[in-house]
Amino acid sequence: MDLWFESALLEDGWADRVRFRLADGRIEAVEPGVEPDAGDERHFVALPGLPNLHSHAFQRAMAGLAEVRGRADDDFWSWRELMYRFVGRIGPEECEAVAAQAYAEMLEAGFTRVGEFHYLHHAPDGSRYDDVAEMSGRIVAAAESAGIGLTLLPVFYAHGGFGGQPAGAAQARFLNDVEGFAGLVERAKAQLPPDGVIGIAPHSLRAVTPQELRVLLPIADRGPVHIHIAEQMKEVVDCLAWSGKRPVRWLLDEMPVDRRWTLVHATHVEADEVAGIAASGAVAGLCPITEANLGDGLFPAAKFMAQGGMIGVGSDSNVRIDAAEELRLLEYGQRLTRRARNVLAGEDRPATGARLFDAAVKGGARSLGVETGLAAGRPADIVSLNRDDPTYAERKGDALVDSWVFASRAGIDCVWRGGVKRVEGGRHRRRAAIEARYRTALARLMA
Ligand code: ZN
């Protein structure tokens, strides 16, 4: 069935009365300025689906459990201890059930593709499952169950600190040597659906030695390369002690960082590092909700975007899954520290929410190795705004996106991914079944 919208944010700007002809999961043709046919499904406003470039799906299961103060200097590292306790209990079934729930919620929020930074590879004691890519297969199955696009980023993790320090017992599930990892990636690749993308994710400079990093890169082929970097000041201090350089500086100097790369967080960066990431074409993978929740700090987004830097957003810990809120918090962090308004608006695009949305669609696509946007030939990944939300009354063009980002509560109506309607009336069409399985898995995890 073809879709008709009162207005649509197309690749080249807003248009009214737009029909999308769909075929084989793609937009076959875009017809602006037409009246609806009798057979068209009619909707309000179409936006392109937003890529979610960074997720650890299993962490959805612990959302809300880490908000109790454990000790006076509670910080990221105490959160990580709780996360590791969960890591010790999640088996394949729980992994798939929790990920499907997270992915259904992502679609409801307007995300149509997820970059899963997947590091739970082995059994809790570190022993291999019969299929070494069992857990990757569960991520693939969860993405198919929810109907979200998947860019799978198997994580290489080998060490517990800079300079090849041994990993701890709690990290046993994550560990591979380079050869084992290459086999795992090969096997995971074979499990992907036709529009799936595979990349690699060296976990961080804490977990990978320079020698390993150099050997890993060819495994990515032309696919995406994601790495956590400079999220915490302790990491910066440890990296300085190890190499004499800050993490981002080290990476830019030592590795062929280019547009295939996503630097996740990159929170603690100095001016030369900001300029270096922007010039490389790498995407800064920002996760504003998680970075706020973990007390990480604030990436200098205004300076970075002013230099042409590409950004995208990720839901990371999945403590809350909300695309509009990621963009809103990204801007609000800048406002609060600079005591100014509309910091991330552009001279070419003065509407702040619309500019951030557009940047995150383009940066997210680059990061996840896909094409997005509403244009002929692109995947039919489309989000419709909810006409019944009074927030949108008498809004047009970019003001609609600003109102979604800054003001709406029930802002999304339908979401199509690969031409199939996955969300209707703001609710995932398979939510009941996915949620029931999630609740059963949580009962086992928390028992
Ligand atoms: Zn992460």
Image: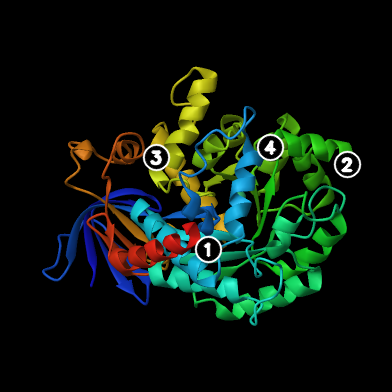
Depth-wise, is mark 4 or mark 3 nearer the camera?
Answer: 4
Q: Please identify the residue farthest to the left as the structure is shown.
A: 38
Depth-wise, is mark 2 or mark 1 nearer the camera?
Answer: 2
Q: Is residue 113 above or below residue 288?
A: below
Mark 2 is surrounded, within 10 Å at the Cα level, by few (under 14), some (14 to 19) or many (20 or more) other residues, namely few
Answer with mark 3 or mark 2, whichever residue precedes in sequence: 2
Residue depicted at x 23% and y 73% = 1
Answer with mark 1 or mark 3, whichever residue precedes in sequence: 3
Task: Say which of 274 and 179 sits in front.
Answer: 179
State the residue position of label 2: 242
Q: Is residue 108 above or below residue 252?
A: below
Task: Say which of 257 and 298 sits in front.
Answer: 298
Secondary structure beneath dot 2 equals helix
Q: CA distance from mark 2 to mark 1?
A: 36 Å
Mark 4 is surrounded, within 10 Å at the Cα level, by few (under 14), some (14 to 19) or many (20 or more) other residues, namely many
Residue depicted at x 41% and y 46% = 323
Secondary structure beneath dot 4 equals loop
Image coordinates of residue 141 in percent, x first then y, are 47, 74
Answer with mark 2 or mark 1, whichever residue precedes in sequence: 2
196 with respect to 304 (left or right): left
Q: CA distance from mark 2 to mark 4?
A: 16 Å
Q: CA distance from mark 4 to mark 3?
A: 30 Å
State the residue position of label 1: 370
5 with respect to 431 (left or right): left
Residue depicted at x 75% and y 39% = 235
Q: CA distance from mark 1 to mark 4?
A: 30 Å
Secondary structure beneath dot 3 equals helix
Q: Residue type at mark 2: give it.
A: Trp
State the residue position of label 3: 354
